[in-house]
Each structure stands twice: as C-alpha cells, then as structure tokens.
Amino acid sequence: MVTSFALLFLSIAVIESMAGILGNGIILAVSLSSCIRNKTWSPYDMIMISLSFSRFILYSCNILDFLMVVFCEQSYYEENVFVIISAAFIFLNSSGLWFGAWLSVFYCIKVASFTQSFFIWLKQRIARLMPWMVLTSWLYSFATAIPFAWDDYGVPINFTAALSMANSSAMRTTRKDSLGLLILLCNAAISLPLILSVVSSVLLIRSLWVHSRQMQNNASGFGDPSLEAHVKAIKSVCSFLIFYIIYFICVLLLLCGEFSLLSNGQSICVAVLAACPAGHSMVLIWSNPKFQELPARIWMHTNCPARTRSM
C-alpha cells in the first residue's frame, strides 16, 4: 500500500521531471542552433547536445513510465513494457552520467592551469578526442543495458528492481545468479564516470582556488570581475560534484534493494534521482549566458501581448 508520504514524493518526482525536460530542452535547442549557425560542432556543444538529449529522453521515459503504471498497470507488466523501460533507463542513466563526467573533464582541461605535459597534450587534442569519447560513452552505455533487456525465465526469484521513477516499485523475475552480475554492471557503469568527475572536479577546483588567491593578492579585491568569475566557476563545479555524488548514492541504494516496495525511503530516493540532473541542468543554464538568452526571449514574448492588452 502506498502511503501519502510516498505518494507526495512520487508527485514531486514528476514535477522535477517536467522541470528537467524544460531545462534540458532549452540547453538542447540552444546548443543545436549554435552548431547550425556556426556550421561546426565544437567539443563543448557536442557534450551539451549529448548530455541534454539523453536527459530529455530519460525524463520523458520516466513520466511515461509513471503514467503507464498508474493507468495501464496490467498491460505494463503483461506486455513486457517494464523490461523495455528498465533497459532504456539503464542506457540513458549511464549515458547521462558519462556525459556529465566528460563535461567535468572538459572544464578541467580547458580552464585549469596545469603545466604538466599530459594536460598540455590533452588541451591540444581535446577537439579531436571528444567525438570518440562521446561515441565510446554511447556504446558503453548500450552494452551495459543489454543484459537488462534479456527476458530470462529460469529459476525465479522476486526482488525489487528499483530502476526509475515508477518501475522502482516493480517486481521482476530473473535468475538468482544473474542478479549479482546485473548489479555489478550497473555499479561499474556509474562508478567509472563518478571517478572521472570527482578527479577532474577536484583538480579544477584546486586550480581555480589557487588562481583566485593569486588574483586577490595582486588585484583590487573581490570587486575584480575576473575574480568574481573564478568564484562563480568554483561554485558551479562544486554544485556539479555534489549533485553527482548524491545521485550516485541514491542509485546504489535503489539498485541494492535497501528499501521495501514503495516505502518512504524509496520514494525519497526516487525524488532525489529526479532532482539531481534537473538541478545540474539549471546550474548549467545559470552559469552560461548563452543558455539564458532563450528563456529571456520566451519570457519577453509572453509578456509583450499581456502588456499590449493592458494598454
């Protein structure tokens, strides 16, 4: 039985998913228009398009999943829709984590002021490496999701496969010896990009902090625009890292079945899973003036007719 507390957090997760669709739709539209206008695919735009596209589809699948469980629960399980959505969630979730990690690596390579030969080598070749990094991430995520699409009717055991907003409450039949392998694959899929993101973020924060202290000692103080830009960048990177770690912890808790079916703890984790990528997208929009132009234009156009009618 679903408690009112659990239902509240599931409803919050739906609202967060809608906000995620809006935020990632803005990033995707702006990045695509930039590529079309410039007739080139910069490494940054390539990462942002891949990241926002995977999250846009992920949030759309989550809302569709929730609606199907609520209104079409019988056909949801009888027609193996749950298996398809579970595999799609693993694929899109892993892809989003990888692209978020590559974004942190890209920031670290382009912004951090390290003089080691390896960083210099990466700075010179990041534009050529980025397409292969994106392609490898798609392929790795696809390979991780394949086992979850297998419909294996061997020795049945029931366990809570907490994989997305609605299917986190579903009971699935699978082989007992394959459960550990599936959890191991998921952990590997999210652990590797987490390590990349943590290492690159820590290096970038250290570089920005050292540079900010030097600027503070040599310049006029915190009124310096360059110094304020560095402080803003440090806050953005820290927020990225916090979102990433919280998301990682919640995914592990759900995959390992730490909570009972539709419990309060599980509902909170589901809401946090929906909130972290959406919050990351909002920080990206807040920290990049290019992404702020489209919402500003939309807001201006929606207010103009109202002002005209009032006059």
Image: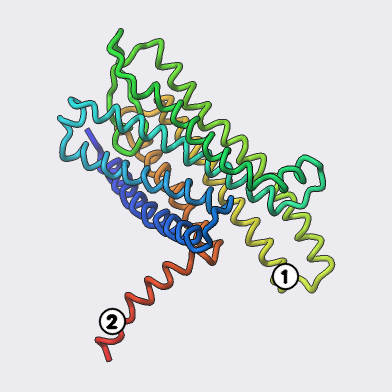
What residue is at 24 percent from the left and 36 percent from the top?
Answer: 2
- Residue 164 drawn at (x, y percent): 35, 36
The kind of residue on which mark 2 rests is: Ala
- Residue 203 drawn at (x, y percent): 71, 45
Q: Quadrant of residue 66?
A: top left
Precedes in sequence: disc 2 or disc 1: 1
Residue located farthest toward the right when viewing the structure as drawn: 218
What residue is at 27 percent from the left and 29 percent from the top?
Answer: 82
Relative to 256, residue 157 above or below: above
Relative to 208, residue 259 above or below: above
Q: Nearer the viewer, mark 2 or mark 1?
A: 2
- Identify residue for label 2: 306
Relative to 104, residue 213 above or below: below
Q: Nearer the viewer, residue 233 or 94?
A: 94
Relative to 146, residue 277 above or below: below
- Residue 184 drawn at (x, y percent): 49, 21
Q: Along the horizontal axis of the image, is 120 left or right of 79?
A: right
The C terminus - image quarter? bottom left
Residue located farthest toward the top when viewing the structure as drawn: 155
Q: Quadrant of residue 303?
A: bottom left
The kind of residue on which mark 1 rests is: Phe
Q: How crowded is the residue under tag 2: few (<14 C-alpha within 10 Å), some, or many (20+)?
A: few
- Residue 305 drawn at (x, y percent): 28, 81
Residue located farthest toward the front when viewing the structure as drawn: 39
Task: State how far apart marks 2 and 1 are (Cα).
Answer: 41 Å
- The dot on residue 222 is 1
| Disc 1, SS | loop
| Disc 2, SS | helix
